[in-house]
Image (cartoon, helix red, strand yellow):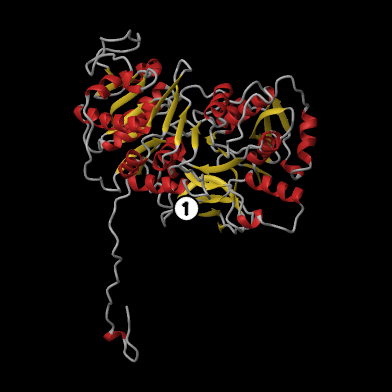
Amino acid sequence: MIVPQGQTDTFAYRIRLMQGLMMNYPLTLNAIFRRAETMAGRREIVSRLVNTSLHRYQYAEFTARARRLARALRDLGLRPGDRVATLAWNHSQHLEAYFGIPLAGGVLHTLNLRLHADELAYIVSHAEDRIVLVDECLLPLWNNVRPQVNVAATVVIAPPTSPGAGQSDAVGAGQPSGKGREESADIRRGDLDYEALIRTAPPLGDEPDPDERAAVAMCYTTGTTGKPKGVAYSHRALTLHTLGLCLDHCMGIREADTILPVVPMFHANAWGMPFAAVMVGAKLVLPGPHLDAPNVVDLFHRERVTLTGGVPTVWIGVLQYLDANPGRFDLSRIRAMYVGGSAVPQALIEAFEKRYGLRIYHAWGMTEMAPLGTMSKVPALMDEACDATPESREALKFRYRAKQGRPAPFVEIRAANERGFVPWDGETMGELEVRGPWVASAYYKPADSADRFTEDGWFRTGDIVTIDPDGTIQVQDRAKDLIKSGGEWISSVALECALMGHPAVAEAAVIPVADAKWSERPLAAVVLKSGAAASPAELREFLAGQFPKFWLPDAFEFIEAIPRTSAGKFKKSELRERFKNHAR
């Protein structure tokens, strides 16, 4: 309201806001696809197949095949908004589905192949998947799922033959399987062959872009408690997330890169790296089912990879493999290795850089965030600091990169505890809350998730953090894993990262155990490196200089392996059950 000078609000009048005169251009994956189609035709996509051989083709063939897949899905009766599930590893045909399904108007739904068949059946039914694309090598898993679900069609993805995916043998020329190459015994009557569908379908032409708010992809959370929850990403959210990944503060993905996402394409869309690579026209290297260190390092060396991302267990294995094969591989082209999924020990970050010149950046995010939230790129002021020796500046940077970093542009953060919002002092713990254009506002067909969102629309992450004055977060724990001893909080994550810095320790997980006096006390479950030895007293002494005395674990249990979730995170619920009757 504008009130002219000397007049009361009785005479106030409303001035129309001036509108901008820019095009209302929809932000869609279709637009990203068209850019790659017209500008990146000669760039290469490399996939390691089940038999470990390499398949290569160019973007021009990838985009043509994605359009043929879109037409084939339409011919199978796909309607706008129908969900199409993929049960597949990282390879070129999965990338075709990443764009062919949206082009057809469907919703890409990646299934986590590490889940139990019963969990997958629940997810497929809850999402109401209409069509499923499944790797031939994963048919034994799918055959345990399909009796429990109702899908209209199963399309089997057989490995392509070199040099082009279009040269694969047919199972059934677009008809129910039973012709062509020798079939897998796991193929069922009525299954369709992916390559035959691609070969016989004409390409789908350009159509009007969809509403940018329409759903284009889905992922389900894989928490250790409760049913998995569906997150439906809009075109707008994924397009903005893709632009965000290409910013230097985030992953800085660019056309000159050769990108190898070790993180599976069924884990939060491989953190969005495939979408970003296609948008800028970067070379993509996809490892298939071979995520072991020898195969991954071979691809780094052979394909001259510049940027990669994976969970800590991957990089722990890679470091051990490099240490065992000194001087054998040239990894000098790698400019960034991103790690997420769980906290990474500072010792691992230092080992990669000091021994091999490889730089690890810590990222944090969630399925509900598409998934990028924060990135530990060292702030410019810290990088330019001149009031410290080079050695102390280097140590400061390592400590910073072991944190989860500052939020990506457009991602806003705050933290709250029982007393209200916490100060950004780097010390006070609170549950992290976020909002932004690629953050979920609700779950798909939610049952009991209202408590995950605040009254003013922020998402409660469940992560307990401290926030530094510059906005850098450090995850202290999941809310359910934080240890409360004598009224004081103890971070299991901090203890785990410190323990994994001990030269004899391969992995460590810290859990609370009941205590009559203090309510809870920390217990450390430790996996030692092969041939290494360490005593509880030695490990306790190693931690003593880094933490208050009351933080130190009362018990150390040496175990063969730490149980993991399907996402590769420590499954602490299993450890808590195992040691629930532990006596001091």
Nearest the camera: 320 or 214?
320
The quadrant holding residue 171 is top left
Q: Is residue 135 above or below residue 253?
A: above
* Left or right, 103 with reference to 331: left
Residue at image location 70% in from the left, 49% down from the top: 396
Disc 1 target residue: 411
Q: Residues within 10 Å of mark 1 (few under 14, many from 20)?
A: some
Locate the N terminus and report the quarter of the image it occupies: bottom left
The quadrant holding residue 318 is top right
Q: Is residue 451 visible?
A: no
Spot occupied by residue 244 in the image (x, y as percentages of width and height): 45, 49
* Left or right, 497 with reference to 413: right
Numbered disc 1: secondary structure: loop
Nearest the camera: 173 or 513?
173
Nearest the camera: 80 or 142?
80
Q: Is residue 15 visible?
A: yes
Spot occupied by residue 336 in the image (x, y as percentages of width and height): 57, 40
The quadrant holding residue 329 is top right
